[in-house]
Amino acid sequence: MDDTIWILVPLAPFLLAGFIFWSKHQQKMIEAQAALTAEKAAQYAAASERLEARVRVLERIATDRGVDVAEEIEKLRDTPLN
């Protein structure tokens, strides 16, 4: 048993260096995943904002009795979604 420990001692720097490289790689992967998640969250927020704006317009049309509903719906069809 004493003989095997002396064989492992010279390998320790290589194992330590390998662990350091692996941990740096893991850190980069975590940062990349976080950036991707943030980008997706921003895209979902923008889409949600556009949908909320459309719903507000539709609620206004549905509750406003003095406006011709068909005309307003046709106007909405002509507007770009962004």
Image (cartoon, rainbow, N blue to C red):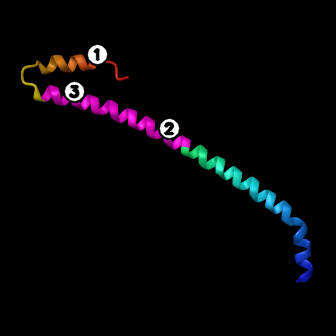
Q: Quadrant of the C terminus?
A: top left
| Identity of the residue drawn at 51% across and 43% down | 37
**Left or right position of 55 against 19:** left
Tell me the element at label 1: helix
Percent x, y of residue 12: 84, 66
**Left or right position of 78 against 12:** left
Question: Which label sits in the foreground, 1 or 3?
Answer: 3
Q: Say which residue label 2 marks.
A: 39
Q: Say which residue label 1 marks.
A: 78
**Left or right position of 23 against 44:** right
Amino acid type, mark 1: Asp
Percent x, y of residue 42: 44, 36
| Identity of the residue drawn at 25% across and 20% down | 76
Tell me the element at label 2: helix
Q: Look at the image and say whether residue 41 sits in the magenta stretch.
A: yes
Q: Look at the image and say whether residue 8 sits in the magenta stretch.
A: no
Instruction: Report the span colored magenta.
Output: 35-62
Q: Say which residue label 3 marks.
A: 57
Mark 3 and mark 2 in contact? Answer it, CB < 8 Å: no
Classify 22 as above or below 53.
Answer: below
| Residue count near mark 1 (Cα–Cα under 10 Å), binned few <14, some 14–19, many ≥20 | few
